[in-house]
Image: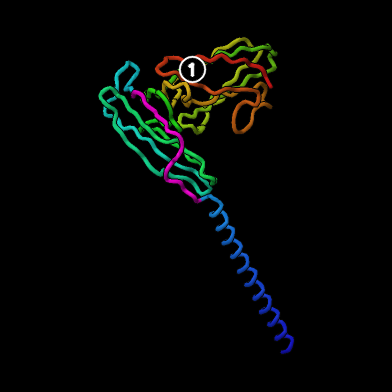
Amino acid sequence: MGILTGKWNNQVEHFKDFEIKEHTFMRYIIVLIMFLISSGCSKISVKSKGAKKVVEGIVFDDCNGNFSPGRKICLQYAYSGCFGGEVLSQEEILTDNNGYFKFQYRESKDDGSTNQYYHILTIPNTTIKILNPEGNMNLYPNDTLMNAIILLKFHQAYTSRDTFYCQFKPSPQGVVEEAEQIQYFVGPFHDTAILLKNVRIGNVTSSASVTAQCGAFKWGIGRNRLDSYYTGQDGGFYLTHAPCVDSDRFEHEVVPR
C-alpha cells in the first residue's frame, strides 16, 4: 500500500507540475498577442493626412470615342496589416454627360504602425482597380481583350538537339492565373513571331503611370531550364497594353542567362 501511495503522490505532483506549465504557457501566448497588438498591427487610421491629390478623367464606353455617362466611380481608402485588411471608407460619384469624373483626396501617410494605407480607384463590376491614382487618366473598362505579337530575336541558332520552350501566364486581375499550355519548337532557331489572341487584360487607362495588367511571357532553352511553377529560368517579360490598340507588338532578345 505504501508503494501504491508513493506512486499516486508522484502522479499527483506530475499532474500539478503539468498544470503549472500549461498555465505559464497560456500566459505567455496572451502576453505575446497583447504585444503584437500594441506594436501596431491593429492600429487603424481612419483618416489619411498626407498631401492633397487629384485624379480626374473620362470613362469611355468603347474604343469609338463614346462616353459612359452616369457611370458609378468609387474611390476607396483601405489598409492591409498583420491580420488582413479592409476598406475603411468609400466615396462614390457618377460621371457627367461627357463621362467626366473627378476626386480629391489626401495622400496616405505612414502612422508608425505596420499597416499599409492606400487609395483605390475602381469601377464596380469591371477590371478597373488602380492604386493611389493621381493626375489625368481616361478609363476604358470595356477594353478587356488584346492581341499580342511577340517577335523573338535569337542571337544564337543552336542545333537540332536544342528545344525552345515558352509559356504565357495571364494576370488580368494582378494575380497570376492558370498558365497556358507550354509551346515549344526545336532548333536551329531563327527570328520568330508568336501570336497571342484574345488575351484578357485589366486596368486599361491612358495614364502613363499605370500599366495595364496582362501577364508574363516566360521562356527557356532546354528542358532543364523549366520548373513546376513557370516556364523560363532563362528569360521573360511582362506584357503591357495601349488603350484600344488592335495588336500590341513586343520585341524580345533571346539571350539565355
Q: Where is residue 13 in the image (x, y as percent from the top left)?
A: 68, 78
- Locate residue 221: give its quadrant: top right
Would residue 23 be counted in the magenta stretch? no
How many numbered markers are drawn? 1
Q: Left or right: 189 with respect to 169?
A: right
User: Which of these two is toward me, 95 or 257?
Assistant: 95
Would residue 56 be counted in the magenta stretch? yes
Residue picked out by circle 1 = 148
- Give the residues drawn in magenta, as a range: 42-58
Q: Where is residue 60 in the image (x, y as percent from the top left)?
A: 33, 22
Q: Callout 1 environment at 10 Å: few (<14), some (14 to 19), or many (20+)?
A: many
Residue visible at 59% across and 20% down? 184
SS at mark 1 in the image: strand
Q: Considering only vertical position in the picture, is 238 above or below 159?
A: below
Residue visible at 65% across and 26% down? 233
User: Which of these two is toward me, 23 or 194?
Assistant: 23
Q: Where is residue 236 in the image (x, y as percent from the top left)?
A: 60, 22
Q: Considering only vertical position in the picture, is 99 above or below 34?
A: above
